[in-house]
Image: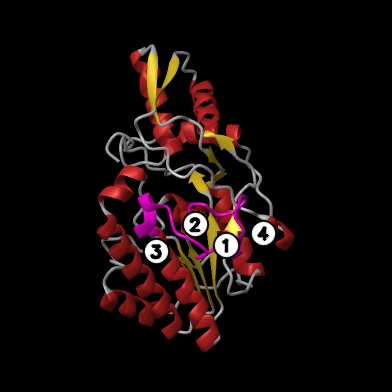
Amino acid sequence: MMEKNSKIYVAGHRGMVGSAIVRKLQSLGYTNIITKSHSELDLCRQDAVEKFFSEEKPDYVFLAAAKVGGIIANSEALADFMYENMILEMNVINSAWKNNCKKLLFLGSSCIYPRMAPQPMPESCLLTSELEQTNEAYALAKISGLKYCEYLNRQYGTDFISAMPTNLYGPNDNYHPTHSHVLPALIRRFHEAKEKGLTEVMCWGTGSPLREFLYVDDLADACVYLMNNYSGNETVNVGTGKELSIKELTELVADVIGYTGEIKWDTTKPDGTPRKLLDVTKLNNLGWKYKVELKEGIELSYQDFLNNPMRAER
């Protein structure tokens, strides 16, 4: 159990997930939170990471740093996604172990599960069949990270855990026109269509894939909860246990933003995995459940988008 004055390092504190974890810790009264920007500490440099850990000796680590992106970014930069994610997570996890960190939480992604995994996806389906090709490099890096945590626990008795969130959205999201995930991309697209008075908006694929979405502040709440209440080698899924089609999501975003034009579908573009709902039975049995419903979360995200001066450049 983390003490209020425990030294807590949040890696990736400027990202959507890391910033939400910092907000959550602060709201709960944790006072000794360490953060380092990329310019202060490059997590891909082993010597820098080792020096940081030997000097700071954090008690707890939330590893939320990662190189992330949507379908296009993932498929165009396979080598970069694999190398950068693998290197940074190995550096942080290894240094945490070497410097007697009490507990570490590693964050993965639901894309680690097989493309045709049983639905909803239980934690036990990991590595039972092949991965989705479009984000295989990212998935392999994330699987390596969670397995390294498991192996350290087995070999050295560490208390390193991992959590697998579903699709995330919320404050500090990336609204880049081509390198963002589906929900922020839709927020931007419908906002711009509304501003320009466009009569129609073209969306990718068929709209039929089913997806689950979790508001990032709910994930942060779950991460702190797991850090304080869970130990084990198996990862823990973090999601809502609810899904909707991309078409339904698109209509919901358009409704929140107030776009009244027509929505069309470019079926020559890829859909990605047909369905990827997480089985959250384990997390619910541990005593945690999500709070923010999707429509409310999209409304909060749209407000963040409107207040985000960097949205056009990111």
Query: Which amino acid, by three-letter code, is at mark 2?
Result: Pro
**Residue wearing tag 4:** 283
In front of the other: 136 or 8: 136
Q: In this view, does 284 lie above or below 300?
A: below
**Residue wearing tag 2:** 114
- Going from N to C along the chain, the mark reached first, 4 or 3, is 3
Looking at the image, residue 305 sits to the left or right of residue 59; the answer is left
Local secondary structure at mark 4: helix
Q: Residue 196 carries which label?
A: none
Q: In which quarter of the image is residue 201?
A: top left
Residue at 52% over, 76% down: 150
Q: Where is residue 271 in the image (x, y as percent from the top left)?
A: 42, 38
**Residue wearing tag 1:** 125
Frontmost of labels 4 and 1 is 1
**Residue wearing tag 3:** 140
As drawn, which residue projects farthest toward the bottom?
Answer: 156
Considering the whole magenta stretch, tell me its main secondary structure.
Answer: loop
- Going from N to C along the chain, the mark reached first, 2 or 3, is 2
Q: Is residue 159 magenta?
A: no
**Image marks 1 and 2: residues in contact by CB distance under 8 Å:** yes
Q: Is residue 128 magenta?
A: yes
Query: Which amino acid, by three-letter code, is at mark 4?
Result: Leu
Local secondary structure at mark 3: helix
Q: In which quarter of the image is residue 268?
A: top left
- Going from N to C along the chain, the mark reached first, 4 or 1, is 1
